[in-house]
Image (cartoon, helix red, strand yellow):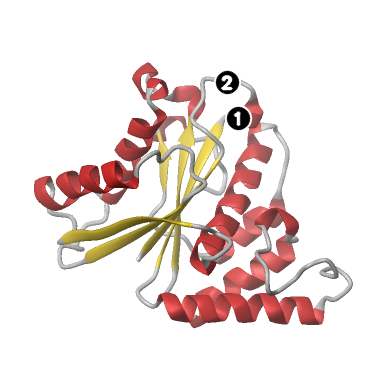
Amino acid sequence: MIIVDESGSITRNENPWNRYFIISVIETQEPKNVIRYFRKAKENYIKHHPGKCKNMDITKEIKGSSMSCKMKSYIFSELRNHTDITFNYIIIDNWNLKPQLYEDPERCFNFIIQKYFSRLRGRKSDVVDILIDERNCTVKSVNSLSMYLRIALCLEKDIFKDISSCLYGNSKASDLIQVADLFANCLERACRSQALGQTNSGNIRSINITQTNHNMYFPYQYNEISFFS
């Protein structure tokens, strides 16, 4: 299963605050185990840091923007050490996109997602399920995305065997989307800080804990992100 979340927007706005559009891409073959350790990590951290987490309710969604960098790092570490989850990301540089990509953000999103998955070789036997946060304003139709990816990745390029489902999910009811949202939040804050000429070592440390390995900066030749790998 592949879970996708986004942060920011595809825009012509030249304010450094809006330079980057982030797509987090997490993957697991054992979603139930990821959910179990995600819940356990949040519960343990809140239990041992009651003063810093006094307004957090483990029974409800806790947004990444409400968590400290130390809490994010702890959660990522627990998921990395006890589950099969992989964390990856796409950074889209709004300042350097071709004009056609601004005109239709959904088409831009579909194109870049397809380009990203095309890099994942050796996956021909995989039947993939894709879960997307329903708040993602760029993905207007999961049906059109599913069809686009099925043609491009399964029929034309033979990357995957099939894409069995492409669905929206609500983060309030989906722990997996909450993990993707948490990761996207870290990425957005770290990238925004660098665009503004600031440092954000806490979120960068959290990102490094995830040990990402299939990341993409688009267009790559304009990359100015120090932690990109």
Identified by mark 2, the residue type is Asn
Q: How dense is the environment of label 2, judged by Cα within 10 Å: few (below 14), some, or many (20 and up)?
A: few
Name the element at disc 2. Answer: loop
Q: Reply above or below: 195 against 199.
A: above
Say if mark 1 contacts mark 2, CB within 8 Å. Answer: yes
Can you tell which mark lies on residue 223? Answer: none
- Residue 78 in view in this figure: no
In the rendered view, does 26 fall on the left or right side of 190? left
Q: Reply above or below: 43 against 67.
A: below
- Image position, residue 34 (x, y; %): 49, 76
Q: Which residue is located at x 74 percent, y 57 percent?
A: 66
Please tell me how many numbered marks the rendered image carries.
2
Q: Which residue is located at x 63 percent, y 54 percent?
A: 204
In the rendered view, does 106 fall on the left or right side of 172? left
**Residue that carries the numbered disc 2 in the rendered image:** 13
- Image position, residue 77 (x, y; %): 59, 73
- Image position, residue 151 (x, y; %): 15, 45
Q: How dense is the environment of label 1, judged by Cα within 10 Å: few (below 14), some, or many (20 and up)?
A: many
Furthest toward the top, the residue is 99
Can you tell which mark lies on residue 18? Answer: 1
Q: Which residue is located at x 44 percent, y 37 percent?
A: 138
The span from disc 1 to disc 2 (Cα, nearest Å) is: 7 Å
Identified by mark 1, the residue type is Asn
Name the element at disc 1. Answer: helix
In the rendered view, does 11 fall on the left or right side of 108? right
